[in-house]
Amino acid sequence: MSAEVVRVGLLGLGTVGGGVIKTIRSQQEKLASRLGKRIEIVKALVRDSEKERAVHVDPALLTTDFEDVLRSDVDIVVEVMGGVEPTYDYVRALIEKGCHVVTANKELLAKKGTELVDLANQHQVHLAYEASVAGGIPILSVLRQFLRTNDIQGVRGILNGTTNFILTKMEAEQLSYQEVLKQAQELGYAEADPRSDVEGFDAMYKLYILTQLVYGESLPLADVVRKGIADLSAGHIRIASELGYRIKLIAQANQAEKGIRLSVEPTMLPLSHPLAQIHDAFNAVQLSGNIVGDLLFTGRGAGELPTASAVVEDLAYLLTQPFTPHPTWKEKTADKAGVSVDSEEHVLCYLEGSCHTATPDRVLHFLQQAGVSVHKLKVQFDLGGVLRAGLIVTGISEEHESLLKKDFGLEVRCFPILESA
């Protein structure tokens, strides 16, 4: 007796969409054996049906009209086209028709996830999104199991492979940000317009999804602390290294008595920290549980096959599981008084300016008089009379930073330090 056929539609046939087709084809027999069902791609929505593609697809399966997908009697649709519009309207229409949806679209989920989760529950369909966070690392599946016994005290990680590649290269080869960005674009790690990656938006969307799963609520995106890497210099990285730290773009969520704090920003890690060992385009997620302690998950976070793997695993999962309601997503506005950074936390301050107007002694005297504690200092001079200094401090405020700029002519950049492993 032949296996039941599951009709699958694709929204998008770019890098990830092509990887999904390759994965289904290469694993077809295994999937049919394990699931008792054969997966058949019956329609693929594309922008240009004449475009040359890396994977061969029967032209009859391609369409530029979303209505063709709706009319195709698909059981499941895989959404890998990205963006919010018109993607949201398409996904909404599919759910309302009773179609299961698998998506890799972190921006869509971060901006419209609360509505889509409610809609999926209303129509009793699966909304699966493992591929939206950390590519091939099955972190969302792990969390669903893990949360049954452990309370998660914190989640942090490197959630963007492009920025991790750039920071790795800047440190290893002592190159400028612009030089490495160009390399990343040539290698296909960075888009022609890299802003979503390098300004921290991509990591912020993924952090939002993780936080919904871990805490059952998240902050609105506007309340997330977000800083990118575009203004990082070789000087920042060199001073950090000389003080025993490495800069990584760290996304983290912590829950305190007064609420959740979410941040995505360049962060100083001791060289011994597990996340400091994650190089190139790899991603990593670290969880702190009240029973199990710290766990680290790492793997390739982007690219054709890692993301496609997560998509097809989601497909396989929902073909074997009955529908159960999704936990509702909620947003809670931050309590501004409760989620500010503790003034006693260590930060690394990088100072740069003319040594004719600022000397280390004068700067240290000013900070001491202002009540700022300096725990460690590293000073560099160059032949052009430029002072560069890195200070590990506690108690520094925005007012202090303004005075350093106004009175000493120093540019100031402060980085949080993640000491605990």
Image: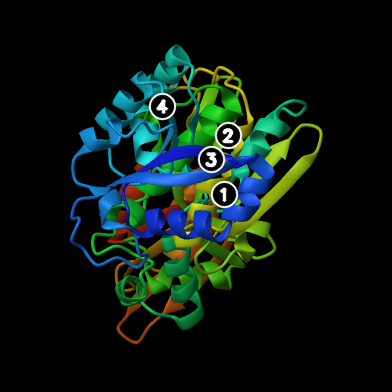
Are the residues tagged 2 and 3 within 8 Å (C-beta)? yes
Q: Which residue is mark 3?
A: 315
Image coordinates of residue 1 in percent, x first then y, are 64, 40
Who's the residue at 38% across and 73% down the image? 387
The residue carrying pointer 1 sits among few (fewer than 14), some (14 to 19) or many (20 or more) residues within 10 Å by Cα, namely many
Q: Quick one: which residue is furthest to the front in this view? A: 1
Q: Which residue is mark 1?
A: 157
Q: Quick one: which residue is furthest to the bottom in this view? A: 383
Q: Report the amino acid beneath label 4.
A: Cys
Q: Quadrant of residue 67?
A: top left
| Element at label 2 | helix
| Element at label 3 | helix
Question: Cα distance, mark 2 to mark 3?
Answer: 6 Å
Q: Quick one: which residue is furthest to the top in this view? A: 122
Q: Which residue is mark 4?
A: 99
Q: Which residue is mark 2?
A: 319
Are the residues tagged 4 and 3 within 8 Å (C-beta)? no
Q: Quadrant of residue 8?
A: top left
Image coordinates of residue 287 in percent, x first then y, are 67, 42
Asked if one can make out residue 377 in the rendered structure from this viewpoint, the answer is yes
